[in-house]
Amino acid sequence: MSVSIRIPTQLRTLAGGAGEVSVEGGTVKEALSALDAAHPGFSGRLFDEGGQLRRFVNVFVADEDVRFLDGLATPVGDGQTISIVPAVAGG
């Protein structure tokens, strides 16, 4: 299944400056792994040592946070968009 991944500005250098990348994958984990295979460096920025999403990285499928769905096992359909959104903090 071909899905699009929206890349935040902070990570676009890893994707050659692209704001969106198309990859193959049937789940969020498969798609993010394909992203890292095509553009090395993403896994280290997105996942912790245990293979889980870092707490400051939010991932959405169809505007739904995957943490409230099936996590990295959340299925993605052909043509869907995955958005990587870093947490914002400030005061």
Image: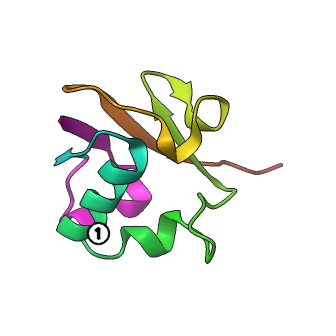
The colour scheme used here is rainbow
Left or right: 32, with 21 as reference point: right
Q: Give, as a single range, the part of the protein colored magenta.
A: 1-19
Magenta span has 13? yes
Image vertical order of residue 3 relative to residue 86, above or below: above
Image vertical order of residue 69 relative to residue 46, above or below: above
Residue 72: give x, y in percent of width and height: 51, 46
Image vertical order of residue 4 relative to residue 42, above or below: above
Residue type (three-letter) at the residue carrying disc 1: Leu
Q: Identify which residue is drawn at 61% across, 71% down.
A: 48
Element class at badge 1: helix
Quadrant of the frame with the N terminus: top left
Residue 44: give x, y in percent of width and height: 47, 75
Instruction: Return the residue at label 1.
Output: 14
Left or right: 13, with 59 as reference point: left
Q: Identify which residue is drawn at 64% across, 38% down.
A: 67
